Image: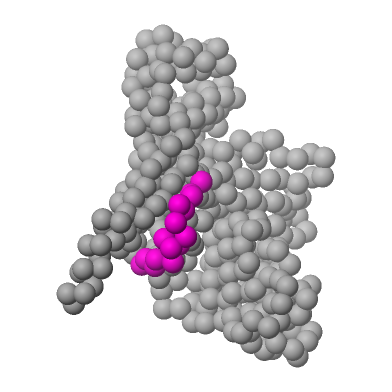
Amino acid sequence: MGPNYTQEQVDDLIARFLSGNITAEEQEMLEQWINANAENRSYFLQLRDVWQATAAAGSYDTTAAWEHLQENAGIRPPLVVNRWKSYFRIAASYTLPFLIGGGLVYAWSSLKKGDSSNGMVTVTSPKGATTKIELSDGTEVWLNAGSKLQYAQSYNLRGREVKLEGEAFFKVHTNAQKPFTVKASDLKILALGTSFNVKAYPEDKTVVTTLVDGEVKIDGSKTTTPFGLMMKPHQHVVYKKPLANNNSEHGTMPVSGGASTTAAPVETRDVNDTEIYTAWKDGNWIVAAQTMDELAITMERRFNVKVIFKEPELKEYRFSGTFRQETLEQVLNILKLTAPLKYSIDKGTVTLEVDNELKEKYIKAFKTK
């Protein structure tokens, strides 16, 4: 079994990890147990799969799922069956939870498989979870929901380059001889020892870089309008991907250090609080004057759901606030405090529509001010 833990201790550690209620010390204990042998890792991944499926479904047939687990793993003594049935009932009671632990285990699984055909390692953080990994040079990476990180199996031998699709927070280990490079869309973001956030989902119209500390150089030499710039701490840079008629958009600025003197599609500004852009890695979600339409995109990634608006007018309502590891229903109930909406959740689909009664109350409240 590896480290000298009782079976009950191991089960409790796994349940705490999967529910996101594990301490750093307990997680270290669990990782030691998982890495002790292949049997431990196999059982752990089996439990992870059943837990995630149970949480996503929101309902659970304990007998069927336990039989499925035993058929696949075949390593559990019957004395603990009832205890794990109880754990899975807890998972079923979650309303599409934000499972940090689930993403981490998913990453471990992906890293084992890799892609031997082209010498690349792919780490995927599924929708509904975040993922934390540590690269071979000591660099720490947090991947947001629905994100993918790729790097060569030879990473850190001659260079340190990763490719990002989605959002990630990087805490880079210092190595002046080997700058750390993130390829995001048609940008290269170079850093030494620093902490920064990059948001570059393929479907988004922008690539957003937020520097917490250190120095970061953005290389836009491969873009339609080549540019380059050096970021300072607490700077926030938004690069607009080339679109039809994008040159006519306002808000672009000339950037020094690039291969062209024409205006680059980049906006740069200083921010006092970088946590607005990095809080997600700690399970929080800070919203600053975003529309419901923008919130819906994050909601779909964060909770692995599809959001449908029955009335387009709801998309224009704006919200500011902080969600601290709330469930999907808790988030929606908070949004109802500022927008006249009602919602329904069915099989992973969230339907939002105007609550006319609530809308009338809001209108009357504004008239009395």
| In the rendered image, the vertical position of residue 282 relative to residue 77, given as above or below | below
Q: Is residue 317 magenta?
A: yes
Looking at the rendering, the stretch of residues picked out in magenta corresponds to 306-320
| In the rendered image, the vertical position of residue 194 relative to residue 235, given as above or below | above
Residue 333, image x and y in percent?
30, 51
Residue at (49%, 26%) from the top-left corner?
A: 50
Q: Name the side, left or right, on which 89 lies relative to 77.
A: left
Residue at (56%, 21%) from the top-left corner?
A: 39
Q: How is the image coloured?
A: one colour
Residue with the most extreme right position: 117
Residue with the most extreme top position: 78
Residue at (68%, 83%) from the top-left corner?
A: 248
| In the rendered image, the vertical position of residue 332 relative to residue 220, given as above or below | above
Residue 11, image x and y in percent?
39, 25
Q: Is residue 128 visible?
A: no
Quadrant (top left/top right/bottom left/bottom right) for the C terminus: bottom left
Residue 327, image x and y in percent?
36, 46
Q: Name the side, left or right, on which 206 lies relative to 82.
A: right
Q: Nearer the viewer, residue 359 or 29?
A: 359
Exactly how many numbered labels are in the figure? 0
Residue with the most extreme left position: 368
Q: Is residue 203 visible?
A: yes
Q: Name the side, left or right, on which 42 lies relative to 150.
A: left
Residue 251, image x and y in percent?
59, 84
Q: Is residue 11 magenta?
A: no
Residue at (30%, 56%) from the top-left corner?
A: 356
